[in-house]
Amino acid sequence: ATMVLTPRFSVLDSLGDYAEVRRLLVFGTRVSVWLSCFISQCLILLGPAFIGRWMGVPFQNISSPVLIILALPLPLFLAHSVSARVLYGIGRVRPFATTTAICAILNLGLSLFLVQHWGIAGVAVGTAIPCLVQVLVIACIVCRATELPLWRFFQQAYLAPLCGATVATLIWLGILIFFALDSYLSILCAGIIGLGLNLALALLFDRELSQRVRGKVKVLRHQQDH
């Protein structure tokens, strides 16, 4: 979904409007973190029950730790795709490609080493660690390219979604105590509850996102009235 931002960043770069590049980078990353946090929550909270229903309890016990390990860094890894769109749009592809290649080699090396000690869970850890490294390195590269302080980028793009996701996770866990996730319907209902909870907290924690949603709603209402 973030690939559509590449031509927009190219236009802004040609116009020299780096203030808008920085604004769109921060806002796009923040929205991506909100979405990917919800995906990660679903995988961690509902994934094991779904696997147990689909494949059976023995397979659930084996695969759930791997699923959780891979899901934990997912919000950061998916969100950094906006940074990649910036680098593509402004023509800074080489550092991104180099970082991706190095992290792929690190992924392979760690996985081969850790699988000997922790089995398939070691492969998951060997994948998760390079993902986090890649996120940090790409963030440094894009902040340097756009002259955006790194601490400000993380504060404005990650702080609100991660805090909101933490609150949502705790509330969702409390709700799931009263759920017996023993059928596809109950898992689906639990997912819908979590979606509504995350949407409400996103609009509460993120003022800019809330304003944009309200603006879109007003435009749709205006179009329907005419």
Image (cartoon, grey):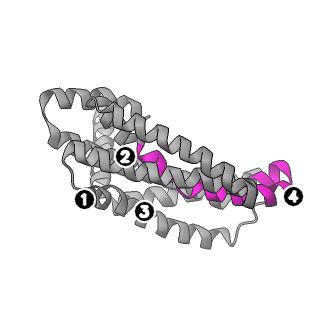
Q: Earlier in the sequence, mark 3 or mark 2?
A: 2
The numbered dot on residue 162 is 3
Q: Quadrant of the N terminus?
A: top left
Residue at horizontal 81 percent and vertical 48 percent from the top: 54
Distance from Cα at disc 2 to Cα at disc 1: 15 Å
Q: Nearer the viewer, residue 82 or 127?
A: 127
Tell me the element at label 3: helix
Distance from Cα at disc 3 to Cα at disc 1: 15 Å
Residue at horizontal 27 percent and vertical 53 percent from the top: 208
Within-10-Å neighbours for mark 2: few <14, some 14–19, many 20+ = many
- Going by the numbered disc 1, the residue's amino acid type is Arg
Residue at horizontal 67 percent and vertical 53 percent from the top: 113
Contact flag, marks 4 and 2 (Cβ < 8 Å):
no
Say if 49 sits above or below 101 in the image: below
Provide the residue designation for mark 2.
138
Q: Position of residue 11 (x, y in %)?
A: 21, 26
Provide the residue designation for mark 4.
58
Observer-side mark, 4 or 2, equals: 2
Observer-side mark, 3 or 1, equals: 1
- Going by the numbered disc 4, the residue's amino acid type is Pro
Q: Position of residue 94 (x, y in %)?
A: 35, 32
Q: Earlier in the sequence, mark 2 or mark 1?
A: 2
Give the main secondary structure, helix, strand or loop, of the magenta stretch.
helix
Q: Is residue 100 left or right of residue 216?
A: right
Residue 159 figure quarter: bottom left
For the record, the magenta segment spans 51-80
